[in-house]
Amino acid sequence: MAGPFYTIMQDKEYLDNFEITLYKNLHGYLLAQNEVDKMKPDAPDIEDKWEQICQSYLPDGMREFGAYPTVSLGWMMFIGMAVAQLWDDDWEKYSKEKDLYFFLREVRGYDCMDEHICEDILKLNADEAKALTKLCGDMALSAHHALLHEGFEPGTPMAFHAYVRTLHQLYLAGAAVQLKRMGYHMTKI
């Protein structure tokens, strides 16, 4: 008879496989669009901010997910891009921000955070912002479809963990896209 520990390990393995498959699908799409390099970026400073950003984002993201799932997911890709840009601009300064998510959200609020990131952080013109918004929307839609395809029961721990792992992959995807846009190319040494 399998005990609770066995069930927890099965769930972790299932979620690990879900996240790996999601990464491959999202990365493949971005690679086909020439938005990322074949290799994942090695950006520990950006990755190190993930947990704090996620914890701060979850109340807003979860609240919005029911009515606006692609916004809830897509905003995390914008956040990943913003963090990569801040890393390049002045990480000595921005790494000291107590809450980078709050720092990004508070300028124009949650609903207009994409515009703030496009205009004020990434400094995009209107056409570039429109193209980026489409890219983030496509990625969020693909991620949402992946969640729906798995059939996670809403409100369960599995659904919550799958949502967090999806946000994580979108955050990393956003960072990878922005790093490439800034001229950082990932190649084998």
Image (cartoon, helix red, strand yellow):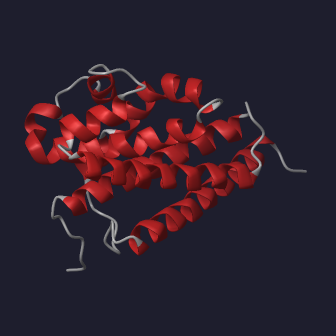
Q: Residue furthest bottom?
A: 189
Q: Nearer the viewer, residue 80 or 75?
A: 75
- Residue 145 screen position, x and y as percent: 65, 53
- Residue 110 screen position, x and y as percent: 41, 24
At horizontal 27% and vertical 41% (from top left) the residue drawn is 118
- Residue 62 screen position, x and y as percent: 57, 28
Q: Nearer the viewer, residue 78 or 46?
A: 78
Q: Residue furthest front?
A: 127
Determine if residue 12 is in view: no
Does 88 appear above or below 24? above
Q: Nearer the viewer, residue 143 or 155?
A: 143
Determine if residue 38 is in view: yes
At horizontal 17% and vertical 43% (from top left) the residue drawn is 123
Q: Quadrant of the C terminus?
A: bottom left
Tell me the quarter of the picture where residue 65 sits: top right
Name the side, left or right, on which 5 lies relative to 3. left
Name the side, left or right, on which 113 lies relative to 83. right
Q: Nearer the viewer, residue 65 or 16?
A: 65
Name the side, left or right, on which 16 lies relative to 180. right
Q: How many marks?
A: 0
At horizontal 66% and vertical 49% (from top left) the residue drawn is 147
Does 41 appear above or below 102? below
At horizontal 29% and vertical 24% (from top left) the residue drawn is 99
- Residue 132 screen position, x and y as percent: 35, 52
